[in-house]
Image (cartoon, grey):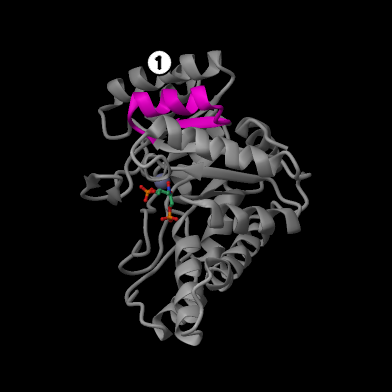
Amino acid sequence: SYVNTREILDKASKEYYGVAAFNINNLEFLQAILAGAAEKKSPAIIETSEGAIKYAGMGDYFKGARIFVNMVKEFANDLDIPVALHLDHGKDFNIIMACIKAGYSSVMIDASHYDFEDNLRITKDVARIAHAAGVSVEAELGQLAGIEDNVEAAENVLVNVDQAEKFCAESEIDFFAPAIGTSHGAFKFKGEAKLDYDRLKKVKEITGKPLVLHGASSVVQEYVKIAEEHGADFGGSKGVPSDVLKETVKFGINKVNTDTDLRIAYIAGLREYLDNDSKQFDPRKYYKVAMDYTKQVVMDRIDILGSAGKI
Ligand SMILES: O=C(COP(=O)(O)O)N(O)CCCOP(=O)(O)O
Ligand SMILES: [Zn+2]
């Protein structure tokens, strides 16, 4: 069934397990994600960035938002698991409104690149409007290093715990993303993967809200290897190790943003297939291994986060 994201995350927050939020840009990733989540009897949060919405709508983001709502609802209505659709890293007010109008379960207002007062003001505005339309809201404090959309954040800015308290109290958001040392993409750490558990524990204690981990992909080396055996160059790639991920769930992370892991599994399967079958040109065939590997990563992630059977 198609649900509001709060329904999934309030339960996860109460029972201290994680629910992966999987990014999609097309039909094939959605099919692989829902097949994996259904097999694991796990709730599923599907999320799309502004880039994904522009991509699907060929530049028309109202169309893109409607395409994703219709695709997700078509599948969700026939599934026994709760499925939500979330706007990831909403920065453009018009795209946020397009998603609310199209029927998204929740939206992220990402004003984390503004100073605290502006972030709070913008977030309050969006929360008021989204809630009036029955849509739940995510917001972020602190910054992840690396390219976030087209905004280059030089280095990590970790969440300030006192600011988090004021932010969550005054902005009325439903779930909160504290930056604790992760970054987007496949090259998250030069050395050891260290996250600030202490800040995370304090933020959970003070806000009591469902929390979100951005940049949470583990960059599974099994699929990196397959991709590299078939021509990819992902040297130096490193993600959040699964034991570290489990620690963050133990300390209160409930929504676990996962995009890179799906992308690597998919490209590994696609490269492997194309190397092994020079005669094939049916996309229902040459995407199959890519989708199988992506489904496998989805199911492994669900096992690590503990959301299997939580429906
Ligand atoms: O936190 C994450 C994913 O983190 P990951 O890279 O560790 O999977 N996300 O919000 C996904 C961001 C995807 O944005 P874009 O479509 O512009 O590339
Ligand atoms: Zn993110």
Q: Indicate yes or no whether the magenta region holds residue 106.
A: yes
Is 210 placed above or below 172 here? below
121 sits left or right of 245 in the view: left
Residue 208 or residue 46, whichever sits in front: 46
Residue 187: x and y in percent read 34, 64
Number of numbered markers: 1
Q: Is residue 201 at all visible to an observer of this figure?
A: no
Q: Amino acid at mark 1?
A: Asp
Q: Is residue 252 magenta?
A: no
Residue 216 point in image, percent of width and height: 47, 55
Secondary structure of residue under mark 1: helix
For residue 296, what is the image quadrant? bottom right
**Residue drawn 51% across and 74% down?**
269
Q: Bin the neighbour count of mark 1 within 10 Å (Cα to Cα): few under 14, some 14-19, many 20 and up.
A: few
Percent across and percent down for residue 164 are 42, 30
Q: Quadrant of the C terminus?
A: top right
Q: Is residue 190 above or below residue 235?
A: above
Instruction: Name the residue located 45 percent from the left edge and 70 percent from the top edge.
Output: 267
Q: Is residue 293 visible?
A: yes
Q: Residue at x 78, y 44 (%)?
A: 80
In front of the other: 121 or 287: 287
The N terminus, quarter of image: top right
Relative depth, front residue between 156 and 70: 70
Q: Position of residue 21 (x, y in %)?
A: 55, 47
Whether residue 308 is situated above or below residue 295 in the rendered picture: above
38 horizontally vs 247: left or right? right
CB of residue at label 1: within 8 Å of ligand 2?
A: no
Q: Which residues are the magenta region?
A: 90-108
The residue that appears at 62% across and 49% down in the rendered structure is 18
Question: To which quarter of the image does residue 305 belong?
Answer: bottom right
Q: Which residue is mark 1?
A: 125
